[in-house]
Amino acid sequence: MSLLSQAKPRRGTAFRPSRNSRRAGTGRLAAALLSPSLIVLGLVVGYPVLAACRLSFVVSNETIDPQTGFKVTATSYGLDNYAAVFTGDRFLRPWWNTTSFALASVAVEVLIGVAMALVMHQAFRGRALVRAAILVPWAIPTAISGLLWKWIFNSQGVANELLGARVLWSSEGFQAWLSVVIADTWKTAPFIGLLVLAGLQIIPGELYEAARVDGASTWYAFRRITLPLVRPALVVAVLFRLLDVLRMFDLPYVLVGPRKHSVETLSMIAFEEMSNLRFGTAAAYATVLFLYIAAVAFAFVKLFGADLIGRGTRSSP
């Protein structure tokens, strides 16, 4: 019998593709199914980002034409817009406001959100009503929330009546910064509570029963069982809130107002530059803010290991 006849497959046996070929076919199918979404994202997100980066290097110079006497605008490419961004406290003050808002708001929101999640996780009469009431602030649009808190922090509003003082919350100073932190915490703490609640509901109850049998206290069970198991959901919630508050614009703009140095953020100053038709400088501020948020997100993921794509739950082949 020849070698060709020996290599010929037996009649009645089906050809079975290898594991690598099956994976390659699955990858091609996944790429074909995802390609429309990726194209739309590239047009909606990718192109504006690249256009803004290009615009940030466009420098506009206005001169007077000696022959006609009219104003002439000449454009060129350079780093003058970024030089204008980083000179003086025009950048440092909004950068500090943006960072301080993120640190203070997220820290308070984590404490309140975890407490909300623990309350919503308990089994008691009227739990559904409590969950709905807690989530109401998060459902209110930010601009409407800013208007509500602007009425509360009015010179003759509820806040001053409770304090028994006449604090000018919308004027320059620490009180304006504090009003934004309070309003932002009230609105977005339920978001962290909702994500932490989802993490609490996947913790087996047998662990707490075993801890009670062993004589563990409530605080010990919270530190040794609840916090470690709810950590992935909490890390993702904190990351989302950091990315959201670093680009804060509408709440301080509506609550306190524009051009207030105490609450002016990088997003607000970029909007102000764009309103004054200084598009190159506005794009430079927006690009710097984008890079700052990307750096914070990268550092946070590296330090705390936020599992954003579910790699920790994927089983090994």
Image (cartoon, helix red, strand yellow):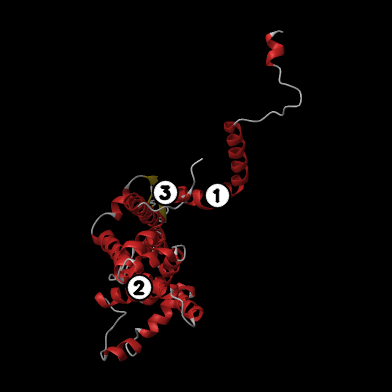
Front in this rendered view, residue 109 or 149 = 109
Q: Which mark is residue 221?
A: none
Does the rendering let one see residue 95?
yes
Location of residue 33 in the rendering, given as x and y in whole percent from the top left corner: 62, 45
Give the answer, above or below, for where 301 lies relative to 184. Answer: above
The residue located at (49%, 52%) in the rendering is 48
Residue at the spot x=32%, y=51% of the render? 299
Q: Which element type, helix, strand or loop, lies under badge 3? A: helix
SS at circle 2: helix
Is 304 in front, or is 176? 304
**What kind of residue is marked 2?**
Ile
| Marks 2 and 3, how far apart at CA | 38 Å
Quadrant location of residue 267? Answer: bottom left
Q: Earlier in the sequence, mark 2 or mark 3?
A: 3
Q: Which residue is mark 1?
A: 43
Up-down relation of residue 66 to residue 113 (above or below): above
Pick whichever, 178 or 66, lies toward us: 178
- Between circles 2 and 3, the one closer to the viewer is 2
Q: Give the side of residue 246 with respect to residue 142, left or right.
A: left
Quadrant showing the N terminus: top right
User: Looking at the image, is mark 1 or mark 3 nearer the viewer?
Assistant: 1
Q: For the point 32% across and 77% down, which residue is it?
A: 179
Residue that mark 3 sits on: 53
Q: Which residue is mark 2?
A: 112
Residue 174: x, y in percent? 24, 75
Asked if one can make out residue 270 in the rendered structure from this viewpoint, the answer is: no
Mark 3, residues whose alpha carbon is within 10 Å: few (<14), some, or many (≥20)?
some
From what the image shows, is residue 300 above or below residue 167? above
Q: Are marks 2 and 3 in contact (CB under 8 Å)?
A: no
Quote the CA–CA distance across marks 1 and 2.
39 Å
Dot 1 falls on a residue whose secondary structure is helix
